[in-house]
Image (tube, rainbow, N blue to C red):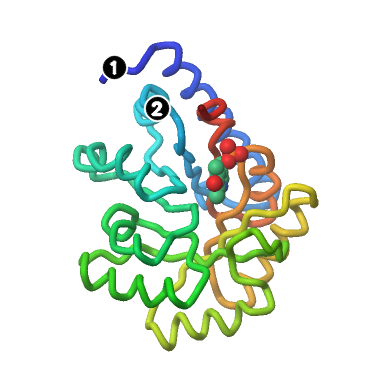
Amino acid sequence: MNPDLSEQDGVAAARSAILSRIADAAKAAGRDPSGVALVAVSKMQPDDRIEAALAAGQRVFGENRVQEARERWAGRREARADLELRLVGPLQSNKAADACALFDVIETLDRESLAAALVKAFDRTGRAPRLFVQVNTGEEPQKAGVAPADLPAFLDMVRETHGLAVEGLMCIPPVEEPASLHFALLARLARRHGLEKLSMGMSADYELAVRLGATSVRVGSALFGERA
Ligand SMILES: *Cc1c(COP(=O)(O)O)cnc(C)c1O
């Protein structure tokens, strides 16, 4: 498939601007820019924009639905061994095996039933994606994630009862509050629990997230344009 030329230019230009803003934010915080990954959130984006991002060199992509991600990526994945796919949306336990078969990283582990389903899915698929725990830093009832106060017990349970390794923490701050408070809280929780990876920051606030320690930022609309 040949990407539309104007899409290709637009996505490539947006990508290099985002990468340089990430690098500037990292340097301003005394961090090495290579310690921050740009996760291109490709949900609901048309194929020509996906192809444009690939042509520009983007290799790490985020999706929030298993079925949609499989339609978009299963074929492309076979042709490209260097892709890294991350699930950044909620995962139902009955889709755990499908998720393990497709994704390299699952960022939204948030309950014991899912931990148990993932252990079975690892056995069944022979694949074990890296795991992040989603933290509901704003304690919003409608939002997924472990409450900050419950995180220590949750991590113990995941590690000891289920034998799973957790690589990092992920959060989606409440829209009406300053994101900085939530990013700082997530960074503090990760430090306290010896976790190195922090998935935080989206199109509106990824530079702030990098200054506060993000090791990956999840950027959709600022990279691809508005979703359909
Ligand atoms: C859609 C989505 C994003 C990207 O949002 P933008 O504002 O378009 O950058 C990031 N993280 C999650 C979990 C998402 O669902």
Residue on which the image places disc 2: 56
Q: Is residue 55 above or below residue 4?
A: below
Give the Cα distance between marks 1 and 2. Answer: 13 Å
* Sequence-earlier tag: 1 or 2: 1
Q: Residue at x 23, y 45 (%)?
A: 81
Q: What residue lies at 60% left-to-right and 82% top-to-bottom?
A: 152
Q: Position of residue 88 (x, y in %)?
A: 48, 52
Question: Which mark is in front, 1 or 2?
Answer: 1
Residue that mark 1 sits on: 2
Q: Is residue 176 left or right of residue 32?
A: right
Q: Mark 2 Cα within 10 Å, few/some/many (few <14, many 20+)?
A: some
Q: Amino acid at mark 1?
A: Asn
User: Considering only vertical position in the picture, is 68 above or below 48?
Assistant: below
Task: Name the residue nearer the viewer: 132 or 226.
Answer: 226
In the current view of this chain or complex, which residue is farthest to the right? 177
Q: Is residue 34 above or below residue 101?
A: above
Q: Nearer the viewer, residue 194 or 62?
A: 62
Q: Is residue 23 visible?
A: no
Residue 24 occupies which quadrant of the picture?
Answer: top right
Q: Quadrant of residue 19?
A: top right
Residue 185: numbered disc: none
Residue 148: image location, x then y, percent? 67, 73
